[in-house]
Image: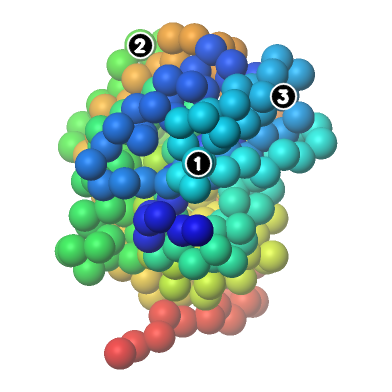
Amino acid sequence: MKTSDSIVIIPTYNEKENIENIIRAVMALEDNFNILIIDDGSPDGTAAIVKGLMETDFKDRLFIVERSGKLGLGTAYIAGFKWSIEHGYDYIFEMDADFSHAPSDLPRLLNACRNEGYDVAIGSRYVSGVNVVNWPMGRVLMSYFASKYVHFVTGLPVHDTTAGFKCYRREVLETIELDKIHFKGYAFQIEMKFTAYKCGFKIKEVPVIFVNRELGTSKMSGGIFSEALFGVIRLKISSWFRKYPQKKTA
């Protein structure tokens, strides 16, 4: 039984230090969010913790999809999007498990889509300066200028193009042809925003403070950045030859 119109998708791989705390923090919010965990075969027992909470504290509000092995962030979210659409959710969120995205910001993203008329709300690190805590300066600069690079190449009018903290109205995910989204890492986040923009959806950046994880291990790698670097060029070129489905007008 669906108990909310809003669901937060949280992909996990070896997040046993964070998973129960992040679930409880989201569930404590007044907006009554549901949560979908997409676990890629975590050997540390992350899925078992989630299933225990499903049986005890959060029946009908917490769900899990278990996959065998690390299949990539992008494919995890695509699986979550399809599950959420099939189960009738109207507002579908992306969020990390490690508290780099503050659960208290979820209602602000929801408000932008539910009450302000936007189709996509992005928790943005760069729309009001640089709001990043505890990242090495080199990584801050790399992330910041990566977004500038994406804007320059694609024309996407978004300050934080690689942000992974977002709310979508269901219509966005039903329209943008999820099976044509190909990238898996940082480039996945760029491709989703670019495709939503090309389909005519309204995007708002909501300023948030991004805090580097304190527990667990980062999944960042050089390959993820190289995918974004070269993927952006391929994304722009392919857009010249693709007809994007458009947002339905009332």
What residue is rendered at 23% in x and 41% in y?
A: 30
What residue is rendered at 76% in x and 19% in y?
A: 43
Q: Amino acid at mark 3?
A: Ser
Sequence order check: which comes first, mark 3 or mark 1? Answer: 3
In this view, 208 is above or below 119: above
Question: Whole-percent x and y of residue 153?
Answer: 48, 53
Residue for badge 3: 42
Residue for badge 1: 59
Q: Amino acid at mark 2?
A: Asn
- Secondary element at tag 2: loop
Which sits in the foreground, 241 or 208? 208
Q: Residue furthest bottom?
A: 250
Q: Amino acid at mark 1?
A: Lys
- Secondary element at tag 1: loop
What residue is rendered at 61% in x and 61% in y?
A: 82
Name the mark nearer the viewer: 2 or 3.
3
Question: Whole-percent x and y of residue 39?
Answer: 67, 34
Which sits in the foreground, 156 or 168? 168
